[in-house]
Image: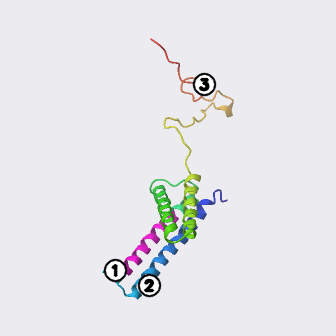
């Protein structure tokens, strides 16, 4: 059963984007190589190889982000540590690419970048951990005389919420 399909969608979108970015940069490298022209004195072979290397690097980066999203989908748990940082960096990259693509490419590319940005942020927010105080104690397990056995819940004071029970209020402050 798929409880939260957003992680699956993000994983698929990032894998497709990884292939698309790698293929586009590889194609641009081939075009620059076949032009055999210099741009401000730069070697055309250097530009072609740089474009191909950049395509491989960014393709692997987006594929790694897709793997993190796939692991989130498979485990049905929020990303933690390096995976969370990777997805946040992918969101920032898509925000920057969206801003640049508006002026350089057009609104279609901008819309695509914003949709992917929204999906990544939705993934991060959907699987966000609930806030829990640091001093919160884990729930106490019933003792040998627990409620199932008709006992007092294993507490010393007969289950009335004595010292150390999560149901008691803190002691009242005293004045000297």
**In whole angstroms, how far apart are the C-alphas of marks 3 and 2?**
76 Å
Query: Nearer the observer, disc 3 or disc 2?
Result: 2
- In percent of width and height, residue 17 lies at 53, 70
Q: Which residue is mark 1?
A: 46
**Which circle's residue, 1 or 2, is located before the other in the chain?**
2
Q: Residue sitting at 47 percent across and 62 percent down?
A: 96
Earlier in the chain: of badge 3 and badge 2, it is 2
Residue 58 is left or right of residue 167, and the answer is: left
Residue displayed at 49% across by 35% down? 135
Marking on residue 31: 2
Q: Secondary structure at mark 2?
A: helix
Q: Are marks 3 and 1 in contact (CB under 8 Å)?
A: no
**On-image quarter of the N terminus:** bottom right
Write down the region rendered in magenta. Answer: 45-67
Q: Residues under labels 1 and 2: Cα distance?
A: 13 Å
Answer with the quarter of the image where residue 114 lies: bottom right
Disc ID at residue 161: 3
């Amino acid at each position: 059963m798929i409880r939260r399909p957003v992680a699956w969608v993000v994983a698929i979108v990032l894998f497709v984007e990884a292939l698309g970015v790698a293929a586009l940069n590889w194609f641009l490298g081939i075009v620059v190589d076949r032009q055999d022209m210099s741009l401000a004195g730069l070697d055309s072979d250097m530009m072609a190889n740089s474009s191909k290397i950049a395509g491989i690097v960014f393709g692997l980066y987006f594929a790694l982000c897709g793997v993190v999203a796939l692991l989130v989908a498979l485990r049905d748990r929020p990303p933690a540590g390096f995976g969370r940082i990777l997805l946040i960096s992918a969101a920032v990259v898509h925000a920057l690419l969206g801003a640049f693509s508006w002026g350089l490419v057009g609104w279609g590319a901008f819309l695509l970048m914003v949709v992917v940005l929204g999906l990544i942020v939705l993934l991060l927010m959907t699987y966000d951990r609930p806030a829990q105080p640091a001093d919160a104690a884990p729930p106490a397990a019933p003792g040998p005389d627990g409620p199932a056995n008709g006992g007092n819940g294993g507490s010393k004071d007969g289950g009335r919420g004595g010292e150390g029970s999560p149901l008691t209020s803190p002691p009242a402050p005293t004045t000297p």
